[in-house]
C-alpha cells in the first residue's frame, strides 16, 4: 500500500523504491522486543508501551549498522511521528516528518486495522478508512489521507 500510495503521488522511481524498501523494513526493530509485549492480547501497560516505542529507533540503528541505504533510515525512524507532533520518537510535526514516513504511517495503520491481531479483530476497509479520516490532521497528514482514500477507491474499482 505504501508503494501504491507513493506511485499515486507521481514520485520518482528512486523515491518510490526507497519508500517501498523502508515500508518493508519499518518494523524490523520489533525483533529486539520481548514476545510477551508483541503478542499481548490485551492493552499494554504504560511501561510496556514505552518499551514498544523503542522499536523505531532500534530498527533505524540496526539498519544503519547493516549499511542499508541512508535514505531509508529516517523513514524507519520516524514512521510513528504524528502530524500534530504527538508521536514518537522525536515528536516532530507536519512536513518536518519525512514524506516516506508519513506514507508508511498511513499504510501501516490501515494494514494494522484490517488484519487480525492478538489484541483486536480486523475492521472492514470502510471502517479503517473512516478511522484514518477521523485522525487526519492529528495523527495523519490530511492531504495524504485524502490521496490514500482516492487510491483505495480506485483500487476497489479495479478489483470489481
Image (cartoon, rainbow, N blue to C red):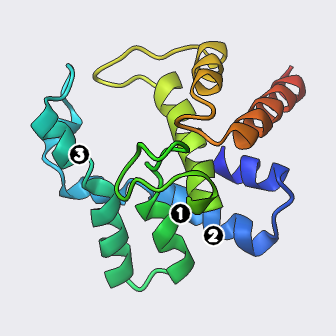
Q: Are marks 2 and 1 in contact (CB under 8 Å)?
A: yes
Closer to the eye: label 2 or 3? 3
Mark 2 Cα shell of 10 Å, populated few (<14), some (14-19), many (≥20): many
> Could you tell me how far apart the alpha carbons at marks 2 and 1 are, in whole angstroms?
6 Å
Residue found 77% across the figure and 34% down from its top:
146
- Left/right placement of residue 84 relative to residue 149 reads left
Residue name at image x 74 percent, y 36 percent = 148
Q: Is residue 65 above or below residue 150?
A: below
SS type, badge 1: helix
Name the residue tied to disc 2: 18
Is 52 left or right of 130, judged from the image as shown? Answer: left
Any part of residue 36 in sight:
no
Res. 62 image quadrant: bottom left
In the shown orientation, is residue 78 left or right of residue 66?
right
At 45% from the left edge and 62% from the top edge, which residue is drawn?
76
Between marks 2 and 3, how big is the CA–CA gap? 25 Å
Residue at 52%, 36% (x, y): give it.
139
Q: Residue 55 in the image: x percent, y percent?
A: 28, 55
Q: Residues within 10 Å of mark 1 (few under 14, many from 20)?
A: many
Measured along the vertical axis of the image, is residue 17 above or below residue 114? below
Horizontal relation, residue 150 to residue 135: left or right = right
Q: CA distance from mark 1 to mark 3?
A: 19 Å
Q: Quadrant of residue 121?
A: top left
Residue wearing tag 1: 22
Neighbor class of circle 3 (other Cα within 10 Å; few <14, some 14-19, many 20+) is some
Tell me: residue 34, above or below residue 44.
below
Quarter of the picture holding the N terminus: top right
Residue 17: x and y in percent read 68, 68
How far across and down, in percent of the image, does residue 99 sit?
65, 59
Residue at the spot of label 3 = 52
Q: Tell which circle, 1 or 3, labels the residue nearer the N-terminal end.
A: 1
Amino acid at each position: 500500500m505504501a508503494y501504491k500510495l507513493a506511485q499515486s503521488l507521481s514520485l520518482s522511481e528512486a523515491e518510490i523504491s526507497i519508500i517501498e524498501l523502508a515500508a518493508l523494513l519499518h518494523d524490523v526493530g520489533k525483533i529486539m522486543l520481548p514476545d510477551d509485549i508483541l503478542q499481548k492480547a490485551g492493552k499494554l501497560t504504560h511501561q510496556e508501551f514505552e518499551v514498544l516505542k523503542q522499536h523505531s529507533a532500534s530498527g533505524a540503528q540496526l539498519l544503519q549498522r547493516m549499511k542499508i541505504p541512508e535514505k531509508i533510515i529516517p523513514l524507519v525512524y520516524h514512521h510513528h511521528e504524528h502530524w500534530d507532533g504527538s508521536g514518537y520518537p522525536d515528536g516532530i510535526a507536519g512536513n518536518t516528518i519525512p514524506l516516506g514516513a508519513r506514507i508508511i504511517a498511513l499504510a501501516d495503520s490501515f494494514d494494522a486495522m484490517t488484519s487480525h491481531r492478538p489484541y483486536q479483530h480486523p475492521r472492514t476497509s470502510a471502517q479503517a478508512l473512516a478511522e484514518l479520516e477521523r485522525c487526519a490532521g492529528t495523527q495523519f497528514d490530511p492531504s495524504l489521507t485524502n490521496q490514500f482514500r482516492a487510491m483505495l477507491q480506485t483500487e476497489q474499482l479495479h478489483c470489481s
